[in-house]
Amino acid sequence: MAQKDNNNAEKWTEKEALKAIKKVSDYNIENKGNYHLGLALIENDLYPELWAYFTNTFKDNPLVFKAIKKVESFLEARIINSTMSGEARGQAMAIFYLKNKHNYRDKTETDITSKGESIIQSPEEREKEIADLIKKAKKE
């Protein structure tokens, strides 16, 4: 029977995960035209599901989790900087990619005062409201 917490057969230890993450990071630094994590993974004989495994397995490990977020943030910043400088070939593609891979969202505004109803009154509605207010004031 195996001992409790026996990790001898575990391939992706903290050390091995950090090595793989460093390879991906180095690839991104060396290949300035890369904007996609998937390509960096493929070029290093890794795959997106493994990256998701690292993210999930090591979410409570500050060292590994920070390394993962550093790689993701680096690519995100590269997309933003290239788009803003005009280097990116298509702003629409950059926006699409940021929304789908980095959870960007369009800003939405909600009107909390009128609850979506028109706040413009017709003259008749305004007169009725004023008359109602006057009646209410006289009763008090």
Image (cartoon, helix red, strand yellow):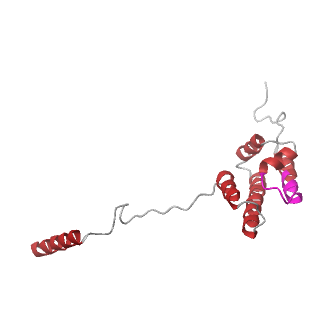
- The quadrant in which residue 73 appears is bottom right
Residue 46: image location, x then y, percent: 83, 42
**Please, which residue is most extreme toward the top here?**
1
- Tell me if residue 52 comes above or below residue 115 in the rendering: above
- Tell me if residue 63 comes above or below residue 126 in the rendering: above
| Numbered range of the magenta stretch | 24-36
Residue 6: image location, x then y, percent: 80, 34
Q: Is 98 left, or right, of 89 in this rendering?
A: left
Quadrant showing the C terminus? bottom left
- Tell me if residue 14 comes above or below residue 11 in the rendering: below
- Tell me if residue 3 comes above or below residue 45 in the rendering: above
- The quadrant in which residue 85 appears is bottom right
Q: Nearer the viewer, residue 29 or 68?
A: 29
The residue located at (72%, 47%) in the rendering is 55
The residue located at (82%, 55%) in the rendering is 34
Residue 126: image location, x then y, percent: 23, 72
